[in-house]
Image: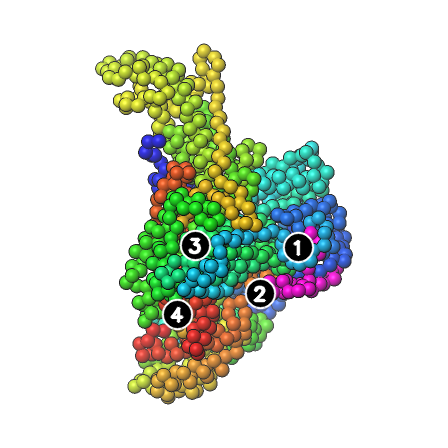
Amino acid sequence: MSNPHFVGVETARPDAADKVSGRTQYIHDLAVPGMLWGAIRFSDHAHARIKHVDTSAAEKLPGVEAVITGYNTPEVRIGFVRDNFALKRDKVRQFRDEIAAVAARDPETARAAAALVRVEYEPLPGVFSLQEALAPGAVLVHETDAKGRPRKDNLVPVRFAHHSGDLEAGKRASKHIVEGEYRVPLIQQSCMGTAGCIASFDTRGNLTLIAKTQIPFLAQKDFNRALGALGLEGRNTRVVVPALGGGFGTGLDTHAYEYIAMLLAWRTGRPVKILYNREEEFAYLSPRQSATARIRQGCDANGKLTFREIEVTQDNGAYTSWGATFPSVMLVPATSLYRVQNISFESKIVYTNNTYCQAMRGYGNPEITWPIESSMDELAELAGLDPVEMRLLNSNQPGETTPMGLKITTCGLQECLERTAAGLNWKENRGKRRNVKRGFGLAGLINVAGGGKIYRSDGSGIILKPDDYGNVNVSYGGVEMGQGLHSVLALTIADTLGVRPEQVIVNQTDTSTCPWDVGTHASRGAFMACNAAVMAARKLKARLLEWAEEIFPVEVEEALAKARKHPGFKEPDFDWRGNCRPGCFELSDGILTIKGAPAVPELQVDFARLLRAIHFRRQGGGTTFAEEAFYEPPTELPDWEKGIGNMSATYAFGAQGVEVEVDEDTGEVKILRLVAAHDVGRVLNPQTLKGQIYGGLAQGIGYALYEEVLTDKGRILNPGFTDYKLPTAVEMGFPIDVQLVQTNDPEGPFGAKGVGEPGLVPTAPAIANAVYDAVGVRIRELPITPEKVLKALQEKRRR
Amino acid sequence: MGYDYIRPASLEQALSLAAQGESALIAGGTDLLVALHKKKRPAPGRLISIRSLPELAGIRDEGARLRIGAAVPLADLLAHPAQARLPALAKALGVMGSRQIRNVATLGGTLCNASPGADAAPPLLALGAGVELAGPAGRRTLDLAEFFRGPGRTALQPGEIMTAVLVPWPGAGTQSHFLRRSRVAMDIATVSLAACFGLTNNRLSGVRLAAGAVAPVPLRLRATETFLEGKALTDETLAEAAKLARADVAPISDLRGTAWYRRELVGVFLARALRAGNGGKP
Ligand SMILES: Cc1cc2nc3c(=O)[nH]c(=O)nc-3n(C[C@H](O)[C@H](O)[C@H](O)COP(=O)(O)OP(=O)(O)OC[C@H]3O[C@@H](n4cnc5c(N)ncnc54)[C@H](O)[C@@H]3O)c2cc1C
């Protein structure tokens, strides 16, 4: 392809103006005629038997159309291992368990009625920590599995592990070994737009669900299965995705509230909307898992890594979402961040009576990069090496295959580390500013960047349909949730096809019009969408240029005839007739011409005119166009128990470094500047790319310093932004230097890699390493609050 | 959620409306409306706005003291030349909420709301401020330290309205400092501390200290004040004072911080405030 005109150029995203001016319609803005409002009655206990549910008072409230419970609706099983129910019967296992639901004429009535539902419980003792849940004879959160067989412990029945090389030999070969236990807290995805949906049925029993989802097609499958439970086998769910105010992983599963809206709509025969407010979002939607990881790592006298041993235990909460499979992604950094042989990785996913958890951006990677990159610094110190030197010595290189079987094609890790260090004047600064309590820290990352195969297909389909006016309508099954997917789709299609980005219109995602896509997660959106788009645009272009052989001469003759009427017209000095072959045409910026032709209007055919001439072909036999393409990346579904398989078509690397100042009296950590160097393959749109990195950094900083959902015996104590703290503009008010390392990946569209998640992956260990450099204390539990730092400083002084 | 909203034209009218009960006074509404929305207080029959009462407006230099109308928005006070003479107060007001909040929130509102963590309280306590109240039984003034009675509880009698805050001008050579920690910006304080004192030849005089978010009410640190009065500002004095201050307060552990951390910070802030007297970084 010739030099792109649009890819790589800073371009305002197509949805920006509508979002800024308030015209974008989110689920909050949508209403369907005749719509009722749903509200849910949640559990008052973390663990209890339900003895009786009395809905009579709720039913009597004027304006109430239906009250449903698990006892008067068909059983709808949901969840990744089908251990959850839309409405609970017999037992509640967490505070947010759905017991009853109401459909009413307005949300206030619905909520008031839900509160009138009377539930009698028999409270049961619960398990609220990993220790309690794993103790011998612990109370069982689930007494039976999905098939009704008795369970003997609180372990979720999925296993992710990896053992390669010879661990003991690795330990023997080690000069230095470090060991530590690291914790990450429960955190909230904190989408600006809260959760909600509208469910409606046609008279034949087909469901339309307007859903805040990142997986429209897997959701369709889930809901079609649920239709079966209603006796509606063979009926279909149409999933329509409205504009999303952020997803961050909350849309990777289907949720009980969506099935409840479906049940209420079926019961009432009217559309039903359920919308969470902020407190409900905090209390009743799944946050990101808390987890504990033990790590042991060693190196030889030269600093070469000799082995790595990790055990992760993850608090699943009461039910299982896709997020339980975080360890599948932890395998990537555990086995493949830096060159290390002799690896052991084991994971446990544990049921508790805490709120059940789900996916969030990074999907296990930040959780595990946190211990790995903290302990890399500890190891470097023991080996007497500079942390950057230590990492460069062990850096991944292009062309290698890692113990997990990941095929590293392009790899910018070394350059990212070097540029991060350079950006901080590492050599002059690190370890030398303790007198002023300033410290420098850095951490690296690896992340899937060409999809992440966790399902039978990791592919994406796309349809390009030009119209008579020169617009190219795009139907794509992935989801724009604020990340800028539609922007990069427009740029890649414009450049591949030869039109202007404004001519590319990306339609709303809708399972009835878009081809299948596995979901927008794992940093795969732009990589998949744009690969599919390039394939489809090339096909479309080839067909158009075939037609051009017939159309172009007719259109040009006509234009020339018209032009000749003007006195003084000069015939173009170019043999265009001799060059009317597909290989000689050029379609660029929405203009069809012949390569090498002088730029005169008579020798140019507008894209729209070309399409119309084909459609309304004078001699008959005209046609319209649509081209479809399906991109399936060249990857493998790993064997999870062995932890082997090349799950992504390419991998992203990066490094982040910070300078911090620590107040030794108060324990406060202040970030003074940050450098983020990311191997992005190739920049598609600098604006949306930097947006992904800035946003990731803000989340990474929140994870590192501020965010934590606090609970007491399963009850969430800070359900709102009053006491759940995100960094504000003030905390983010330091210089950020983003360095884009372009490695031009052969499998990437235009060379691009996925960039959605890396921005938040290494932030926390970089900060912890900088805190250590500043004041010599190592914090192993996120968030790094002033209290933890002050306590650690006092302990250090006492020692 | 809807309320009758009444805007009396005079203090007299407001007092007679308030005397009928079943109502709540609303100034800026930044505390009240949040509490009502979150159902943290019972819904009143009606809201009586005191925002534009002329008797509660204006900032006036009365010679020995500054009289600040109870309904004066924080932003107006911050824009007034008087704030230059009350740096600790200005600093506290400057971190309250955001600009939007400061444009509507009033000084009387934050005092009558009586949050233990109200930022304006410690500097006003340390400045020795008083409050002027009007009620069915007439007018009275009260030392601010007598005004706070517990979280959300004040000395206001039913039907009483705060009309003004009275701040004696600090004497020549008096310094005032304010320190505060919160989890992030736009957050309620975890700990705050204000100090007023004179320092001549390294000797402390007229020491008045107050801390916020470390007890059921914003608190004068009397024992620490007594200890410091007349002392030379030395490291030993500071260490001893920090110890006393930590004993003067009675913090709880909550979502913003533990009692341990709050005690630690009271000592740290006290030392920093006093060191600032010698040009240290507060
Ligand atoms: C987003 C946000 C951020 C905030 N940040 C801070 C902060 O950083 N620091 C801080 O200290 N506060 C903060 N606040 C709290 C609040 O803004 C202040 O306490 C404010 O000054 C209250 O004033 P107001 O005029 O809005 O009070 P209102 O809400 O109108 O009234 C508060 C209470 O006082 C009573 N009342 C008001 N005026 C009188 C009067 N003259 N006589 C008798 N009773 C009266 C009312 O009946 C009510 O009970 C914040 C609030 C919000 C919403």
Please give left or right for residue B49 compared with residue A148 in the image: left
Q: Magenta region's main secondary structure?
A: loop
Q: CA distance from mark 4 to mark 1?
A: 45 Å
- In the picture, which quadrant includes the N terminus of chain B? bottom right
Residue under label 3: A340
Q: Nearer the viewer, mark 4 or mark 1?
A: 4
Q: Secondary structure at mark 4?
A: loop
Q: CA distance from mark 1 to mark 3?
A: 44 Å
Question: Mark 3 falls on what kind of element?
Answer: loop
Q: State how far apart marks 3 and 4 are (Cα).
A: 27 Å
Whether the residues at callouts 3 and 4 have beta carbons within 8 Å, the answer is no
Q: Residues within 10 Å of mark 1 (few under 14, many from 20)?
A: many
**Which amino acid, mark 4?**
Gly
Which label's residue is closer to the chain start, 1 or 3? Answer: 1
Residue at 43% over, 67% down: A778
Q: Residue at x 30, y 63 (%)?
A: A429
**In the image, the residue with mark 2 has its CB under 8 Å from the nearest atom of ligand 1:** yes
Cα–Cα span, label 2 and label 3: 68 Å
Give the x, y percent position of residue B187.
Answer: 47, 64
Name the disc covering residue A97, or none.
Answer: 1
Residues rendered magenta in the picture: A120-145
Q: Which residue is mark 4?
A: A776
Q: Position of residue A348 (x, y in %)?
A: 58, 57
